Amino acid sequence: MAIPVTDLSNLNLAVLIDADNAPRTMIRNIMQEIAIYGTPTVKRIYGDWTSPNLGSWKMALLENAITPVQQYSYTTGKNSTDSAMIIDAMDILYSGHVGGFVIVSSDSDFTRLATRIRESGLRVIGIGEKKTPAPFIASCDKFIYVELIRSKYQEQDEQKAEPKPRRSTKRGAEYPPIPPETVRLIADSVSDIADDDGWAFLGELGNLLIKKQPDFDPRNFGFSKLTPLVRSLPRFEIDVRQTGDANTKHIYVRDKEA
C-alpha cells in the first residue's frame, strides 16, 4: 500500500542507519525528512566505531540523539553491520512498538529485510543515494534519494541567508526533459483508476504511482508537488472541483490521448 503523508504523521518509526553506507554530513537533514512521515521513536546507527573511518560521526549522533551500536568487523571483506541491523530489526518488529521502519542505506543487502517487514504489515521507507540497486528500492513502500534531501535543504538554507522571490512551479533549466517512460507511467496509472469519463483523483494517482515505482518523486523532475508536474505535461488536463468545504478542493486529472 502507498504511503500518504497524512496517514503517517502519527506513525511510530524505527530508524536504522548503516554507517558504512550513509552520508554523515546529511544526517540532520535526513532526520528532518523522516519527521514528515512519522515520529522516530527508535534511532540506531550501526558500524565498527573502533574504526578511524567512523570517528567523525560523534557530534552528528549527539546532536540527533542517535544511538550507536557497536559491531566489530571480525573478518575482512564481510559486512557484519548488515547482520546486526537485521537482527535488531527483527527484535523491534516482534516487539510491536512501531508501525514502520526507515532503513538508511544504499546497500542492496537489506532488500530481504525490507520485504520481510512489509510481509508483517508494517511500512518501510528507504533512504539512500541514487546508486542504490533497484531491488532494494522496489522492496520499500517509498524510497527517497539522499540527493533530493540535500538539494531541498540547501535551497532552504540559501533562502534563509538571502531572501528570494517565491520559487515558480515551473522547472529550472537544470532539469532534463521528463522521460517518456515517466509520462507513460502517469498515463497508465490514470487509466487504472479513472472513472467512466476518464477522470482520476490526483490524490489516488499519487498513491498509485508510489506503489508502482517507490522512488517516484516529483522533486526528481524539478517540481515540489505532483500537481505542477502533471500541469506541465500537455498530454493531461486538470479539473479543480469545489467540495462542501469552501477551503477544500479536489483535483482530478484526465489523459487527453485516452
Image (cartoon, helix red, strand yellow):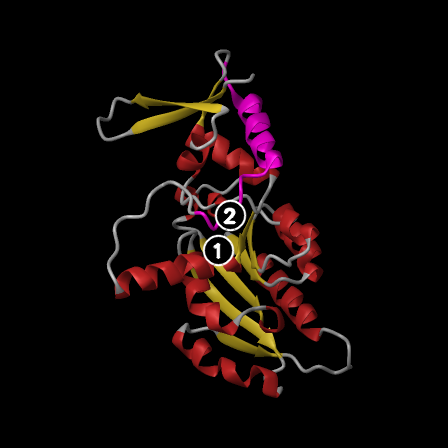
Residue at image position (61%, 69%) is: 21
Mark 2 burial class by Cα count in 10 Å: few <14, some 14-19, many 20+: some
Residue at image position (58%, 23%) is: 192
Expressed as whole percent of the image width and height from the top left, the position of residue 178 reads 54, 39
Q: What's the CA distance linking mark 1 and mark 2?
A: 7 Å
Cβ atoms under marks 1 and 2 closer than 8 Å: yes
**Of 37 and 13, the residue lying toward us:** 37
The answer to whether residue 184 is above or below residue 124 is: above
Q: From the image, tell me which residue sits under label 1.
A: 148
- Main SS of the magenta part reads helix
Expressed as whole percent of the image width and height from the top left, the position of residue 119 reads 65, 46
The answer to whether residue 59 is above or below residue 244 is: below
Q: Which residues are magenta?
A: 173-195
Residue at image position (68%, 68%) is: 82
| Side of 44 relative to 252 (left or right) | right
Q: From the image, tell me which residue sits under label 2.
A: 220
